[in-house]
Image: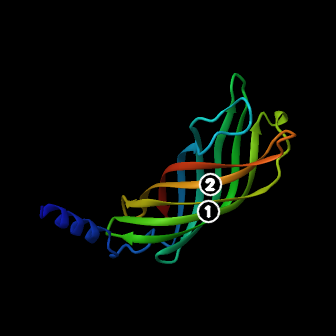
């Protein structure tokens, strides 16, 4: 019975603020991530496969201390047409503020928001309704694991919402997606 309080105490001590109070030991870092993208609801577009898709992002971050700000680019495939060579991906130029919620010597838990401008990009582009530039919003959390003086592993997840212009009569539809991310951050 005594094990649970001891284990909770050790876990809280591990997450308590320590020397690593920010996201990087360097002020400036670059990060690249691969991702799995999951739709949160069925698309209203008939004939599209809504399964798990791939995505990636790259960003440059400036760390102030527990707060950091990133600017980057995200591309996430969000649907494919069944039986044809046609797919759609959301492209976003974004800003991502992060705040470290708890940190230990080698691990930091953070919360993040994401706001950007983007649109749906179709492949091949000739088979797609012209897309408007839209505001794309999201947020999530993650864990940074320090692997070395300048290298950290970033494991996180986020939700983002994108508006997609469809053929008439449906017009525009907003769709939500969950993105599970695995990345590396390199301090400069």
Is residue 185 shown above or below 48?
A: below
Q: Which mark is residue 114?
A: 1
Is residue 161 shown above or below 113?
A: above
Circle 2/circle 1 CB separation < 8 Å: yes
CA neighbours of label 2 inside 10 A, class few (<14), some (14 to 19), many (20+): some
Question: How far apart in space, not on screen, are marks 2 and 1 (Cα)?
Answer: 8 Å
CA neighbours of label 1 inside 10 A, class few (<14), some (14 to 19), many (20+): many
Could you tell me which residue is drawn at 85 percent across and 44 percent down? 130
Furthest residue in direction top, as rendered = 83
Q: Is disc 2 placed on a helix, strand or loop?
A: strand
Q: Which mark is residue 160?
A: 2
**Left or right, 159 with reference to 156:** right
Is residue 178 shown above or below 29?
A: above
Residue 153 position by quadrant: bottom left
- Horizontal and vertical percent position of residue 88: 71, 39
Q: Which mark is residue 179?
A: none
State whether residue 184 appears in this view: yes
**Camera-nearest residue between 119 and 48:** 48
Q: Earlier in the sequence, mark 2 or mark 1?
A: 1
Could you tell me which residue is drawn at 59 percent across and 44 percent down? 55
- Horizontal and vertical percent position of residue 137: 66, 60
């Amino acid at each position: 019975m005594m094990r649970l309080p001891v284990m909770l105490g050790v876990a809280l001590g591990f997450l308590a603020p320590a020397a690593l109070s920010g996201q990087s030991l360097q002020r400036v870092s670059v990060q690249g991530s691969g991702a799995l993208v999951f739709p949160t609801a069925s698309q209203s577009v008939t004939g599209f496969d809504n399964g798990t898709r791939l995505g990636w992002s790259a960003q440059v971050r400036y760390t102030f201390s527990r707060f950091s700000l990133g600017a980057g680019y995200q591309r996430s495939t969000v649907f494919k047409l069944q039986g044809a060579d046609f797919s759609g991906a959301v492209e976003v130029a974004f800003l991502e503020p992060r705040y470290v919620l708890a940190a230990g010597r080698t691990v930091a838990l953070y919360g993040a928001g994401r706001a950007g401008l983007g649109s749906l990009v179709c492949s091949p582009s000739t088979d797609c309704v012209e897309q408007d530039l839209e505001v794309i919003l999201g947020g999530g959390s993650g864990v940074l694991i320090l692997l070395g003086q300048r290298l950290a592993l970033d494991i996180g997840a986020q939700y983002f919402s994108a508006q997609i212009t469809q053929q008439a009569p449906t017009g525009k539809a907003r769709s939500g997606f969950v993105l599970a991310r695995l990345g590396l951050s390199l301090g400069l």
